[in-house]
Image: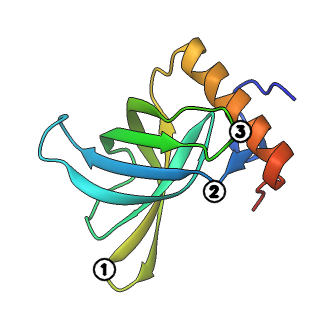
Amino acid sequence: MNQSLNFENRRQNQRTNMWNVVAKAGEEKKLWFSVVIPNISVGGLSFITDKPFKVGDRLWFDLDVDPVLPSIDKFKLLIQCEIKNARELDGAIMSYGAIFCDISNATSARLSELIDRTALVYGSYER
């Protein structure tokens, strides 16, 4: 299932939480801070942090992604995202949903392929 980005209803995009992702985020590609990435799709990602942000804020993400799949190498992704939703998890800990800004077709296709392959190995992740 080679998926294309569905901007009208991003929740239809298949996503995965089965990858190991080491992530840093920052507002200007500097002053990085660590974040947790619970899941990722071709349309965006969710992240958890104790840093306060507002819907509409844009952040850069420096991701080291290990899909944990046979014969698939780790890869790096530097991309800007815009926060589309926020919710409090526990006190000052926040969960944010963000869409990718200006993702290239090649990057989108690679993410789609890897998410599809992950779903074949581990099953899909739907919320």
The residue that mark 1 highlights is 92
Residues at marks 2 and 1, CA–CA distance in whole angstroms: 23 Å
| Secondary element at image label 2 | loop
**Front position in the image: 77 or 20:** 20
- Residue drawn at (29%, 71%) of the image: 50
- Considering every residue shown, the one lying at the far bottom of the view is 91
Mark 2 surroundings: few (<14), some (14-19) or many (≥20) residues within 10 A: some
Q: Which mark is residue 115?
A: 3
- Residue drawn at (47%, 50%) of the image: 21
**From the viewer's perspective, is 102 left or right of 8?**
left
Disc 1 residue type (three-letter): Ala
- Residue drawn at (50%, 22%) of the image: 103
Disc 3 residue type (three-letter): Ile
Q: In the rendered structure, are the residues bearing label 3 and label 1 in contact, judged by CB atoms less than 8 Å apart?
A: no
Q: Which mark is residue 62?
A: none
Which mark is nearer the camera, 2 or 1?
Answer: 2
Residues at marks 2 and 3, CA–CA distance in whole angstroms: 10 Å
Against 110, is 73 above or below?
below
The residue that mark 2 highlights is 17
Disc 2 residue type (three-letter): Asn
Which mark is nearer the camera, 3 or 1?
Answer: 3
- Considering every residue shown, the one lying at the far front of the view is 71
Against 3, is 86 above or below?
below
